[in-house]
Structures are given as C-alpha cells and as structure tokens.
Image: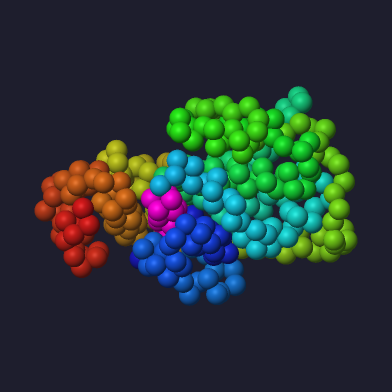
C-alpha cells in the first residue's frame, strides 16, 4: 500500500524545468532523469510527492553545479508557479495581508515547507520551516522560498519593503557568500535557529494597487479555504508512515511508540488504520521501502549500512525485502 505524504502543486515544476533548460538540460531529459510523471503537468491541481520534488531539486543542484541553486531557481518563478495562491497574494490590499494569506494557504502550493508570521517590536518575521510531514528538505528549497519572497516584497512594496535581515540555518559556502549578499542586500545571519525574513513593520501596511474588488477577493479566499480543508483531511496512515520513517534510523518503532507520538492509544491506532484499509505492519514495510531508495540512491549508503539503518537483522533479509519491493537487487542502486 502506497501512502502519499508531503506534496507540491504540479505548477511549481515548470519553473524548475525552465531553469534547467536555461542551463542546458532539456525538459524531456530532465523529467526522465528526475523520474517525474509529466502527465501531471497537464492535470489541474495535480500534485507531486515529496520524493518527486526532492529528486527534481537534487537534479537541479547537480546540473547547475552551483553553491546557490535556490537563488537561481527563483529567477524562473512567476505567478503561475503558485496557482490560485499566487493570484490571492498578488491581489491583496497590503503586504501584511499578502503574507497572512501565504501563511494560511501555503499548504495548497506545498506542505513540504510551512510559513508562519511572528511580530516583533519593530519588525515582522516571516519564517520558513520544514512541513510537519516532510523530511530531508534540500537547502536549495529554503533558499528558493526566501528568494521568491524577497522578489515579491520588492515588486509589490518597492525598496522600502526589502528585508532588513535574512537568517539561514545552514552555513553559506564562502564562494557563494557574495551572491547571497548581492541578492538580499541586507544583514545575513548564518547557522540561525530558523530560515526567516525580517521586514520593518511600518513598511507592510501601505495600500497596494489591486485589480480585483474586496468582494471578489473574499470569494477567492472562500475557494482557497475549501481547498485547504480538503487537503488537510489527510488519512491517519500518512501520519503513521511519517512517524515510522523518522524513527527507523534509531531502530524499528513499535505500534505503541508510534501511537504515543500521535497522542492516541495503541488500540485506537489499530482500529483507525483498519478503518482506512491498512495495518501497522504494512506501514512499517512501506516506510522501509521509501527510505531504502533514499539511502541507496541519494545519500550514498551501501547495502550493509542501509540494512542497518532500516532495522534489518542482516543484509540477506534486507536484500530479500528489496527484491520483493522493486524486483531487483539493492546492489543495483548502491
């Protein structure tokens, strides 16, 4: 049984493809190399799984061979990249209203990351964090978010809306520091607690020119709210699978341990999984399957290391499971 976790609206993918094409990799080759199903590009409101989008970002980073691929990618984003959310944000009455809409409705675009607003004495902080059901999100994804937001603030609010500080959880490579400083043009803080933009409070309340009336904006918000409600009714099995995948590197989790993390009893967890047509054993198997490819293909672990990280007693047991999952030996991908 396959359970989809964090996902991203398919309209985001063309921006990556445009960036790759600009740097010499054509669309068809990029889709094949990243293992992306291109039919979703033509389906309204289609979404790609976190595994798809992570592979695409990894391809971007390897092909560009740049220490700041997220900043480069931001150049190729437009309003269509963000679907209906892009329209709602761009037609907001003020920058602060736009940022509030982003924080509320951003899961419609992607729940790989999440946005939140924090008001300080003289500034407003827009924080970008990994989504609750995401994992191993590339640094380039956070850089992309911070870059796109900065571009939006400048476009709608002018020079006064430029961030006064940007914080990064990672260390910026020495050869990329000038590129970051040139783009953000403000104080940069590395190895911070969060990825965040800080903007002066007084510069977020100015009225913006908007092409739609408040009544139409309210109707658009109502549509977004309905779509968000539908998206957030994720099955319990997705939460269980994410809990299992977080725990596996430290040993095989038990049903009781996962239930405790989700604040329900083991019996309730079993019953609700059964109602969804799944079992804890299936979730454990699915978690190992998902992690196995990540470890072997993308993180460079060998077969023995992967077997250990997934909680198998020996490599033979892991190899049998891998062949059952993918009909090939794990050494094929190591």
x 85%, y 62%: residue: 212
Main SS of the magenta part reads helix
* Residue drawn at x 49%, y 47% as measured from the top left: 69
| Above or below, comparing residue 192 to residue 84 in the picture | above
On the picture, is 20 further left or further right than 98? left
Q: Indicate the quadrant where residue 246 lies.
A: top left
The single residue placed furthest to the top in the displayed view is: 121
Q: What residue do we see at 70% from left, 48% from top?
A: 152
Report the side of 108 relative to 16 (left or right).
right
State the residue at coordinates (72%, 44%): 153
**Which one is in front, 114 or 160?**
160
Give the magenta part as a residue range. Answer: 49-64
Q: Does the magenta stretch include residue 143?
A: no
Image coordinates for residue 137, horizontal then vertical, percent: 45, 46
As drawn, 50 above or below 300: below
Looking at the image, which is closer to me, 115 or 174? 174
Q: Evaluate whether residue 220 shows in this view.
A: yes
- In this orientation, does residue 263 appear? no
Vertical placement of residue 333 versus 120, above or below: below
Which sits in the foreground, 280 or 2? Answer: 2
Colour scheme of the picture: rainbow
Q: Horizontal and vertical percent for residue 26?
A: 44, 66
State how many labels appear. Answer: 0
Where is the N terminus found, in terms of image quarters? bottom left
Q: Which of 232 and 185 is in front in this view?
A: 185
Residue 238: percent from left, percent from top:
45, 56
User: Is 198 displayed left or right of 273 in the figure?
Assistant: right
**Percent from the top left, x then y, of residue 90?**
75, 55
């Amino acid at each position: 049984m396959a359970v989809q976790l964090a996902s991203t609206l398919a309209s985001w993918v063309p921006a990556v493809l445009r960036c790759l094409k600009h740097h010499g990799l054509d669309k068809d080759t990029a889709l094949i190399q990243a293992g992306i199903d291109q039919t979703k590009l033509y389906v309204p409101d289609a979404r790609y799984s976190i595994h798809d989008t992570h592979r695409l970002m990894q391809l971007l980073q390897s092909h560009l061979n740049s220490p700041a691929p997220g900043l480069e990618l931001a150049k190729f984003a437009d309003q269509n990249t963000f679907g209906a959310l892009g329209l709602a944000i761009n037609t907001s009455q003020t920058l602060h209203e736009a940022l509030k809409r982003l924080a509320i409705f951003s899961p419609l675009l992607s729940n790989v990351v999440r946005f939140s607003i924090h008001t300080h004495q003289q500034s407003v902080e827009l924080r970008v964090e990994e989504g609750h059901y995401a994992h191993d999100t590339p640094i380039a994804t956070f850089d992309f978010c911070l870059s796109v937001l900065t571009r939006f603030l400048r476009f709608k609010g002018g020079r006064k809306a430029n961030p006064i500080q940007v914080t990064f959880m990672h260390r910026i490579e020495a050869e990329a520091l000038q590129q970051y400083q040139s783009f953000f043009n403000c104080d940069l803080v590395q190895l911070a607690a969060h990825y965040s933009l800080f903007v002066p409070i007084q510069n977020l309340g100015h009225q913006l020119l908007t092409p739609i009336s408040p009544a139409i904006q309210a109707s658009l918000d109502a549509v977004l709210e309905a779509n968000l409600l539908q998206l957030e009714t994720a099955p319990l099995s997705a939460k269980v699978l994410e809990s299992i995948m977080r725990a596996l590197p430290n040993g095989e989790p038990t049903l009781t341990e996962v239930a405790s993390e989700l604040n329900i009893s083991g019996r309730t967890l079993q019953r609700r999984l059964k109602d969804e047509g799944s079992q804890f054993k299936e979730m454990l198997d699915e978690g190992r399957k998902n992690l196995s490819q990540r470890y072997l293909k993308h993180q460079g672990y060998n077969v023995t290391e992967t077997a250990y990280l997934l909680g198998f007693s020996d490599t033979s047991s892991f190899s049998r499971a891998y062949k059952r999952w993918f009909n090939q030996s794990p050494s094929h991908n190591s």
